[in-house]
Image: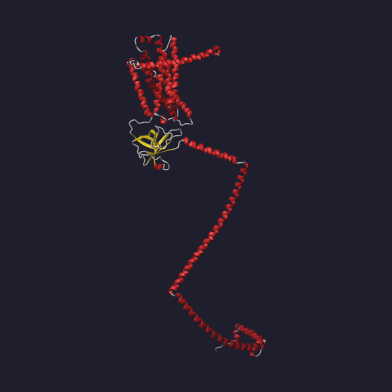
């Protein structure tokens, strides 16, 4: 039987086996990496000196692209809601849909995906390059904890700044939907605000912030992991960057479903 | 680490936190600085009410629902609401939960109990809690409609089983019969109505006559009674007795007159006999008068004489000098 398998099905089955082992090994590696990062958080003197720089790079620099995405998302949401509701549902429900969708789903997820490409790729490429150019090894030689110096500030910056960026994005999306509803739809400001407030709960904001924080953790941790574990030359850096973006994007969607199941 | 980076991050953090806080407050419709007070109401159930739903008085939003909690001591729900402290609640207030629209958004409205007195308000265990009542939501109405639809389906099935072509013909005939019977009954009722009307009119007339007779009898009886009381009847009887005596006397006088009249009749009879003898003689032409009556010559002589006298008088009138010749000297 094993002989037959080696003949026809051997290669695909071996590929599945290698993939499974590789995935399991990757989870194990990531677990060990995160455990080391957790230990490095205690080294506050090392990471506190650079965390603000990372916050500026991850948060402040990402704000324009986040607001751009959110504004057009709000516009499209208002128009599509109007198109869907016409003749069946009162138009003030445009406000409901724009507010709820931006807060609960599109704000965190779209910004998370956008920042996964921008921030996650940036972190993976930067750390991967430092790894292949042995800068990280040099830090270890100088008795610096490379995780405390390179990874912890990025993860903290991601966890702190992602919710803020998403908060601005949520507000921008709502305002864009509001302006669209007033100017392009037969909707007045009181009607839109009525819809906006109709089903609003303070928990909606909390939920949006929790998701954004978890996405920030996922993007920065995955980017740091792939960059930190890069082995080889420039090609490996590119591969790590790609993997970081893909995996963090997938993880964002998984977390999105996880929070929906657990919190809603 | 550059200073501009710290400033930019600090500004973003502060602005982001302010945006989250102020945005949440604004989205909830809170007015910063407005004074509010808490109103608690007690319900048996709360439908689809949620925290943050509006509280209205006469249709005007005056606050929001803060929290909903099961009352552990009794089978009810306690709702805490924040309303503007400037609002004066109506006398004997109650809280009614109702859908604000058909799309699942609910509201709590405060009314005086007299506005909807027929609702079965939940009696709150504490006097400080307003009694509440929750209107049925669309899902409950739909459930009732579903039950009605099921019952209708059962009835329809039974009708389908019972209602054959023959049944339809029978029902048609029954309807025709009912129409005919109805028409007959209508005619009968109309005829009976007319009879009853006539009877009533006769009865009315009889009653009037009886009333009149009764009145007359009453008057008569009262007069009789009055007469008896005043002695008039005795006087009448005495008068009758007197009249009777006078009639008796008159009768006797008439008897006497009758006797005298017999004598007069005898005298008249003898006078008529004598007259009869005279007339007989006249007819026989006896005596002067009889001869005058029986002989026509005298009559003719008299006529001739008369004619001659008339001629003489006419001539005298024409020629008076012939007969009269008057000379003085």
Q: Nearer the viewer, residue A140 or A150?
A: A140
In the picture, the quarter occupied by the N terminus of chain B is top left
Give percent across and percent down for residue A259.
43, 24
Give percent across and percent down for residue B229.
43, 73
Q: Is residue B170 left or right of residue B94?
A: right
**Is there any visible trace of residue A120 in the rendered image?**
no
Quadrant for residue A200, please give it: top left
Q: Residue furthest front?
A: A1
B236 versus B97 height, above or below: below
In the picture, the quarter occupied by the C terminus of chain B is bottom right
Q: How is the image coloured?
A: secondary structure
B61 versus B291 height, above or below: above
A240 versus B252 height, above or below: above
Give percent across and percent down for residue A110.
43, 21
A140 versus B37 height, above or below: above
Q: Nearer the viewer, residue B275 or B107?
A: B107
Give percent across and percent down for residue B267.
58, 88
**Is there any visible trace of residue B214 in the rendered image?**
yes
Quadrant for residue A225, please give it: top left
Q: Nearer the viewer, residue A136 or A102?
A: A136
Total numbered labels: 0
Quadrant for residue A77, please give it: top left
């Amino acid at each position: 039987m094993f002989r037959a398998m080696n003949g026809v099905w051997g290669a695909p089955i071996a590929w599945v086996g290698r993939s499974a082992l590789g995935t399991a090994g990757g989870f194990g590696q990531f677990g060990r990496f995160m455990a080391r990062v957790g230990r490095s958080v205690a080294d506050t003197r090392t990471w506190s000196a650079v965390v603000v720089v990372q916050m500026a790079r991850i948060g402040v620099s990402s704000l324009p692209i986040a607001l751009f995405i959110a504004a057009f998302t709000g516009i499209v949401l208002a128009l599509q809601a109007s198109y869907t509701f016409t003749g069946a549902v009162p138009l003030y429900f445009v406000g409901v849909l724009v507010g709820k969708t931006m807060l609960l789903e599109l704000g965190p997820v779209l910004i998370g995906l956008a920042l996964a490409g921008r921030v996650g790729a940036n972190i993976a490429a930067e750390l991967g390059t430092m790894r292949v150019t042995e800068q990280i090894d040099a830090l270890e030689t100088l008795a610096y904890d490379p995780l405390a110096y390179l990874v912890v500030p990025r993860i903290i910056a991601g966890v702190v700044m992602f919710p803020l960026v998403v908060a601005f994005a949520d507000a921008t999306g709502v305002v864009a939907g509001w302006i669209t509803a007033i100017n392009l739809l037969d909707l007045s400001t009181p009607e839109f605000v009525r819809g906006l407030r109709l089903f609003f709960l303070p928990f909606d904001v909390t939920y949006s912030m929790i998701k954004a924080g978890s996405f920030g953790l996922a993007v920065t941790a995955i980017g740091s992991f792939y960059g930190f574990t890069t082995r080889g030359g420039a090609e490996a850096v590119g591969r790590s960057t790609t993997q970081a973006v893909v995996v963090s994007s997938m993880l964002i969607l998984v977390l999105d479903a996880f929070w929906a199941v657990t919190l809603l | 680490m550059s200073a501009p980076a710290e400033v930019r991050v600090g500004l973003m953090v502060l602005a982001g936190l302010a945006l989250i806080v102020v945005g949440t407050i604004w989205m909830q419709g809170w007015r910063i600085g407005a004074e509010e007070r808490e109103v608690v109401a007690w319900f048996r159930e709360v439908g689809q009410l949620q925290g943050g739903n509006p509280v209205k008085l006469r249709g005007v939003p005056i606050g929001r629902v803060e929290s909903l909690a099961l009352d552990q001591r009794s089978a009810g729900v306690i709702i805490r609401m924040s309303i503007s402290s400037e609002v004066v609640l109506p006398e004997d207030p109650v809280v009614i939960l109702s859908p604000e629209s058909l799309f699942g958004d609910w509201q709590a409205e405060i009314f005086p109990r007299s506005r909807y007195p027929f609702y079965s308000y939940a009696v709150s265990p504490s006097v400080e809690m307003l009694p509440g009542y929750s209107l049925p939501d669309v899902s409950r109405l739909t459930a009732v409609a579903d039950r009605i639809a099921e019952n209708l389906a059962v009835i329809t099935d039974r009708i389908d089983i019972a209602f054959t072509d023959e049944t339809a013909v029978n029902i048609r005939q029954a309807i025709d019969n009912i129409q005919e019977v109805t028409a007959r009954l209508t005619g009968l009722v109309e005829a009976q109505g007319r009879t009853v009307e006539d009877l009533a009119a006769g009865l009315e007339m009889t009653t009037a006559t009886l009333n009149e007779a009764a009145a007359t009898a009453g008057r008569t009886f009262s007069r009789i009674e009055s007469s008896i009381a005043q002695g008039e009847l005795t006087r009448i009887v005495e008068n009758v007795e007197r009249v009777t005596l006078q009639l008796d006397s008159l009768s006797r006088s008439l008897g006497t007159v009758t006797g005298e009249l017999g004598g007069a009749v005898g005298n008249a009879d003898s006078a008529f006999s004598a007259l009869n003898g005279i007339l007989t003689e006249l007819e026989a032409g006896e005596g002067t008068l009889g001869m005058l009556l029986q002989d026509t010559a005298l009559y003719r002589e008299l006529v001739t004489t008369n004619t001659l006298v008339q001629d003489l008088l006419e001539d005298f009138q024409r020629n008076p000098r012939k007969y009269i010749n008057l000379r003085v000297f």
